[in-house]
Image (tube, helix red, strand yellow):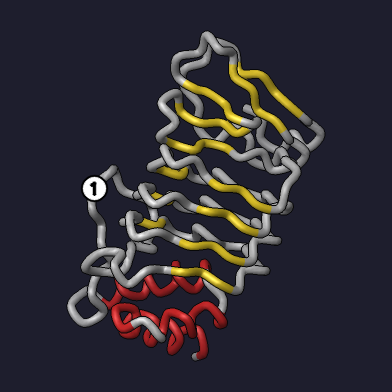
Amino acid sequence: AFEWCSALPSIVIPASVNDMTVIFFGCTNLNSIEVDPANNTYTSVDGVLFTGDMSCLITYPAGKAGSSYSIPASVQRIREYAFSQCNNLQQIEVPNGASYIEGHAFYYCSSLSSITIPESVTYVGGSAFAGCTSLTSITIPEGIGQNPPNFSSPAPAPAAAPIASPDSAPDSLVFEQIQAVTNMLNIQVLHQLLAKTKYQAITAKLLLFSLS
């Protein structure tokens, strides 16, 4: 509805609105999203849009000032394009309790330099960090589960979706997963993944594809 409204500085969501998807993509000067207190579906805190129960972060305004942001502890899911083009942000803290990071969640956050994915996260969607050209550090705990988080696309319905083993999955599936990770991470970050035993097989294959 408001895609590419690049001059839009703020907006108020009325009480009558109960269904929104990706509606603020390209609103690069948007610094505040407010919600009518009578709205039972959505809410906003410090200009950031959430579902009413604060379990899902929908949109962080791309033009919002500040170089760092700590996602509230109640958030379990980070919506697709939630932090798209938030070029002011350099650091984002994901709470231990979040479980799903949808595809393109941090799309083209060009100033984002580091992020930590907590042990509670079981799924990371495809191209979640595509365009994050300043990203040099991404921390993925060893105890994230029995398998690395799924970097394929699209995001599934809420359910466990571990990445397929490179030795048992069809070559086409492995290639898709490798391609998704290649889009998401830079070489410096890949070397960090190589140091983690659980990630060595898929990362080694990724490097072979990216350097060939």
Q: Where is residue 7 in the image (x, y as percent from the top left)?
A: 81, 34
Question: Which residue: 48% across, 62% down?
Answer: 116
Under mark 1, the amino acid is Ala
Residue drawn at the location 66% of the way across and 35% of the way down: 3
Q: In which quarter of the image is residue 140?
A: bottom left
Which residue is depicted at the point 50% across and 57% down? 128
Quadrant in the picture for residue 129: bottom right
Query: Around disc 1, counting alpha carbons within 10 Å, would you say few (fewer than 14), some (14 to 19), or many (20 or more)?
Result: few
Q: Residue drawn 52% across and 15% down?
A: 17
User: Which quadrant is home to the N terminus?
Assistant: top right
Q: Is residue 123 above or below residue 159?
A: below
Foreground residue among 162 and 120: 120
Q: Nearer the viewer, residue 158 or 114?
A: 114
SS for callout 1: loop
Q: In the rendered image, which residue does mark 1 sit on?
A: 159
The outermost residue toward the left is 168
The percent coordinates of residue 144 (x first, y second) are: 30, 64
Give coordinates of residue 102: x percent, y percent: 43, 49
Relative to 104, say whether 150 is above or below.
below
The x and y percentages for residue 199 are 34, 79
The mark total stands at 1
Left/right placement of residue 192 relative to residue 131 reads: left
* Above or below, 206 relative to 35: below
Q: In this view, does 177 lie to the left or right of 37?
A: left
